[in-house]
């Protein structure tokens, strides 16, 4: 897809796929629906993506955003900067609506499991780096398991968004981050 029209058609198809996933779910998603929403011919969709599943996987991968890792010298500041950047990209990609649909569908589709796993790994990479930097500065214990630390931070946020399906207010996020930081900093010297 080197030609500009083809690149525009590709973007249109990917955007229409995300919109259709949110509106119809994985089970309701069809090539016909994507073609209608995007204005891209079904033959073009099949030629460039091969199948509905590959189109869906590419559309979801397009929602993965690279977030720069902040390094202010303070764990709390770094996490707040990072979560603010997540919030902006989540709104852009409708992740609050899309992620529960994908997680549910990934339980039935191994290809989608891989896409969701890639998304979650990329999502946690900057948090892991921020935590490593905090370990190097002595803000948190050097032997603290970082997977556990990540779960302490994002667990309540994920629960609010994915399980309760409630709004992630700035006040809630601030309380969670403050509590997680206090708990993580208490690991120093233990």
Image (cartoon, grey):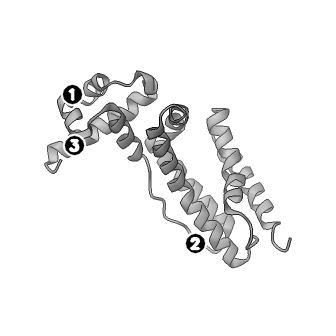
The answer for how far apart the CA atoms under marks 3 and 2 are is 36 Å
Which comes sooner in the sequence, label 3 or label 2?
3
Residue 167 visible in the shown view: no
**Which numbered marker is on residue 8?**
3
Per the model, the C-alpha gap separating discs 1 and 3 is: 15 Å
Local SS, label 2: loop
Q: Seen in the image, is 82 located left or right of residue 62? A: right
Q: Quadrant of residue 39?
A: top left
Name of the residue lying farthest toward the bottom: 137
Rendered residue at 53%/54% (across/down): 121
In x, y percent, where is residue 100?
A: 55, 34
Q: Residue at x 86, y 70 (%)?
A: 190
The residue where tag 1 is placed is 42
Of discs 1 and 3, which sits in the foreground?
Answer: 1
- Secondary structure state at the residue bearing disc 3: helix
Q: Residue 141: which disc?
A: none
Name the residue beneath numbered marker 2.
71
* Position in image of residue 38 (x %, y %): 26, 31
* SS state under label 1: helix
């Amino acid at each position: 897809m080197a030609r500009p029209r083809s690149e525009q058609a590709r973007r249109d198809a990917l955007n229409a796929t995300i919109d259709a996933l949110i509106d119809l779910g994985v089970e309701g998603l069809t090539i016909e629906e994507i073609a209608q929403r995007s204005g891209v011919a079904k033959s073009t969709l099949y030629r460039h993506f091969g199948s509905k599943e590959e189109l869906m996987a590419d559309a979801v991968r397009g929602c993965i955003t690279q977030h720069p890792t902040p390094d202010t010298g303070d764990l709390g500041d770094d996490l707040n900067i990072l979560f603010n950047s997540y919030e902006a990209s989540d709104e852009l990609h409708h992740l609050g609506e899309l992620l529960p649909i994908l997680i549910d569908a990934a339980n039935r589709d191994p290809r989608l499991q891989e896409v969701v796993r890639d998304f979650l790994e990329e999502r946690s990479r900057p948090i892991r780096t921020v935590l490593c930097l905090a370990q190097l500065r002595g803000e948190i214990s050097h032997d603290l398991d970082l997977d556990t630390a990540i779960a302490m931070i994002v667990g309540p946020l994920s629960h609010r968004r994915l399980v309760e399906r409630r709004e992630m207010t700035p006040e809630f996020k601030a309380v969670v981050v403050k509590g997680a930081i206090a708990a993580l900093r208490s690991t120093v010297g233990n």
